[in-house]
Image (tube, helix red, strand yellow):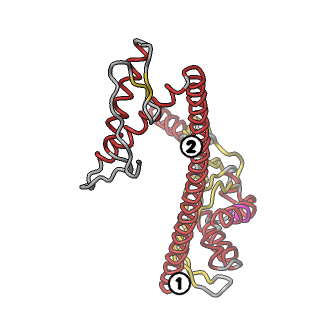
Amino acid sequence: MVYALIGLLFLLVVFILLAVRVVKQGFVYTIERLGKFTIAAEPGLHIIIPFIDRVGRKVNVMEQVLDIPGQEIITKDNAMVGVDAVVFFQVLDAGKAAYEVANLYAAIMALTTTNLRTVMGSMDLDGTLSKRDEINARLLSVVDHATSPWGVKITRVEIKDIRPPLDISEAMARQMKAERLKRAEILEAEGDRASNILRAEGDKQSAILQAEGTREAAFRDAEARERAAEAEAKATQMVSDAIASSGNQAINYFIAQEYTKAVGKFAESPNAKTILFPIEATQLIGTLGGIGELVQDALKPAEGNVTTRSGMPVPKGRARASVPRSGDS
């Protein structure tokens, strides 16, 4: 009796262990009853009927990355290029992913490879090198539509590398170098043109400013000459007024002053060794004496002044003998 109870207890423990199933996070288990898919067990604790129900497939429902091996593809212009790609996908329906396709990973790889050849084979070499985003979008659309019956969502398809042939790579490098040299020459020419334009603008502004300065200087010079003329006219008017008020005395004074200045200029000449006077030297002495007498007359007017033949007044008591000119009798 005791052994039967122990055996029954042992069978109960085994039954409980076979009936309890724990599904890990990130996975979905398919439950088969008598070989037929019945339910997809989500993460957590599940109770099944031992010997009738069993776990069929353990499906990973996290996003996964599938590396597509390198492919040699012939482009539209008959260029051979090597291409590597990666596919990102996620299982949305564990039942379909487990029972609609035999090998999910191999099926996605084959589908991506064939569509990669189709898409890139319809483009020329320049298009394959410059339109990666377009290639990725077309591949994503085609592969996602083809895998949707399998309960799979293709999230991204990316081209990792495109390897053109060596001779084409060298030709592209020479073309790129020539293009960069062309751009450099264009930029240099544009810089020279801009520099010449700025220099010409500077010369133009300089000429304009110089012309304005010349015009301003001419205006100021004309104004200065006008003021000098006005001063000369005023001085002349003052002399005329002095002559009108003083008579012959003022005339003789001004003539003697200018005469003395002219003789002084002869004496100041650095190259003059011999000075020829147009009149006799005695007349200069008489003229200087006449200037002094004019000053004395202005200070102390005296009566009975006598006048020489030259018209210079001589004070009384200081009459001097006049010097006759040569040729006079």
Residue 142 on the magenta span:
yes
Q: Which residues are magenta?
A: 139-143
Residue at mark 1 to residue at mark 2: CA–CA distance: 72 Å
- Which residue type carries mark 2? Ala
Pick whichever of labels 1 and 2 is earlier in the sequence.
1
The residue sitting at the left extreme is 273
- From the top left corner, tell me how far across and down residue 125 is, in percent: 62, 79
Please report the residue visible at 44 percent of the width from the left and 33 percent of the height from the top.
Answer: 6
- Say above or below: 319 vs 26: above
Q: As rendered, which of 273 and 184 lies closer to the eye?
A: 273
> Would you name the residue on which mark 1 appears?
168
- From the top left corner, tell me how far across and down residue 138 is, in percent: 71, 65
Q: As rendered, which of 93 and 210 lies closer to the eye?
A: 210
> Would you name the residue on which mark 2 appears?
217
- Say above or below: 55 vs 159: above
Crowding near pointer 1: few (<14 within 10 Å), some, many (20+)? some
Residue 67 on the magenta span:
no
Q: As rendered, which of 22 and 253 lies closer to the eye?
A: 253
Cβ–Cβ under 8 Å for marks 1 and 2: no
Please report the residue visible at 49 percent of the width from the left and 76 percent of the height from the top.
Answer: 177
- Which residue type carries mark 1? Ile
Q: Quadrant of residue 144?
A: bottom right
- From the top left corner, tell me how far across and down residue 53 is, in percent: 64, 47
Please report the residue visible at 61 percent of the width from the left and 46 percent of the height from the top.
Answer: 215
The residue sitting at the front extreme is 329
- From the top left corner, tell me how far across and down residue 173 is, in percent: 49, 78
Q: How many marks?
A: 2
Crowding near pointer 2: few (<14 within 10 Å), some, many (20+)? few
Q: As rendered, which of 220 and 254 lies closer to the eye?
A: 254
